[in-house]
Amino acid sequence: MNLRLQKELPDCQQFFDLYQTTGWKHPFNDQQLFQAISNSWFTLSAYKNQELIGFGRIISDGIYQALICDLIVKPEFRNHGVGTTILRALLEECRQHNILLVSLFSARGKSDFYKKFGFVERDASAPGMIWDQTKSPF
């Protein structure tokens, strides 16, 4: 596959259309999602011709912690190496900056994909947590 990787942000509408293919539930509109990715430390877009078919981003302090977010591949391009190419490039960016602690959120059923790259699930004795303001008592 002729895949072109680009560090610049994709077009807002193209990103929103790609994001919609995930089925992830969210209350955000296209402009809010674009603002979110615009605030990233590093982004990578994957194109086949002019079509955005994949995306991934890193939120980081640039020194020792990074969080990989929104690794998305259009359904018809999954299992063709697009996600692997994006993830490798994201991890290489972390490696080049000597970032040793890289975390991520995995969509349901996708953890085996990340395990191939050396990611491990957090130990039950040190579980991660997330705050959801819609469920918060204050």
Image (tube, grey):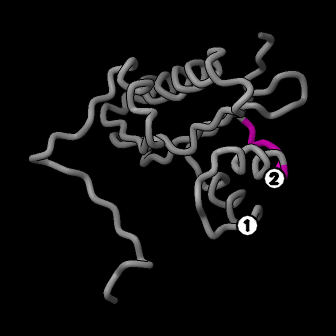
Answer with mark 2 or mark 1, whichever residue precedes in sequence.
2
Q: Secondary structure at mark 1?
A: loop
> Considering the numbered disc 2 on the image, is that residue within a helix, a strand or a loop?
helix
As drawn, is 89 to the left or to the right of 109? right
Q: Is residue 61 above or below residue 2?
A: below
**Residue closer to the observer: 98 or 91:** 91
Q: Which residue is located at x 44 percent, y 78 percent? A: 134
Q: Residue furthest top?
A: 1
Q: 29 and 24: which one is in front? A: 24
Residue 12 marker = 2
The location of residue 108, given as percent across then percent down, is 44, 42
Badge 2 density bin: few <14, some 14–19, many ≥20, Cα 10 Å:
some
- Image point (52%, 42%), residue name: 58
Left or right? Give the position of 10 relative to 130.
Answer: right
Q: Report the side of 24 relative to 18 (left or right).
A: left
Q: Residue at x 26, y 36 (%)?
A: 121
Which stretch appears magenta? 8-13
Residue shown at 9% from the left, 47% from the top: 125
Q: Name the quarter where the N terminus is drawn.
A: top right
Q: Amino acid at mark 2?
A: Cys
Give the number of the mark in front: 2 or 1: 1
Tell me residue 70's x, y (percent).
Answer: 57, 44
Q: Can you identify the residue that label 1 sits on?
A: 29
Q: Residue furthest right?
A: 50
**Residue 31 location, x and y as percent?**
76, 64
Query: Is residue 11 one of those drawn in magenta?
Result: yes
Where on the picture, by quarter, is residue 33? bottom right
Q: Which mark is residue 2?
A: none
Extreme residue toward the bottom, this view: 138
Using the image, determine if residue 2 lies above or below residue 95: above
As drawn, is 135 to the left or to the right of 83? left
Total marks shown come to: 2
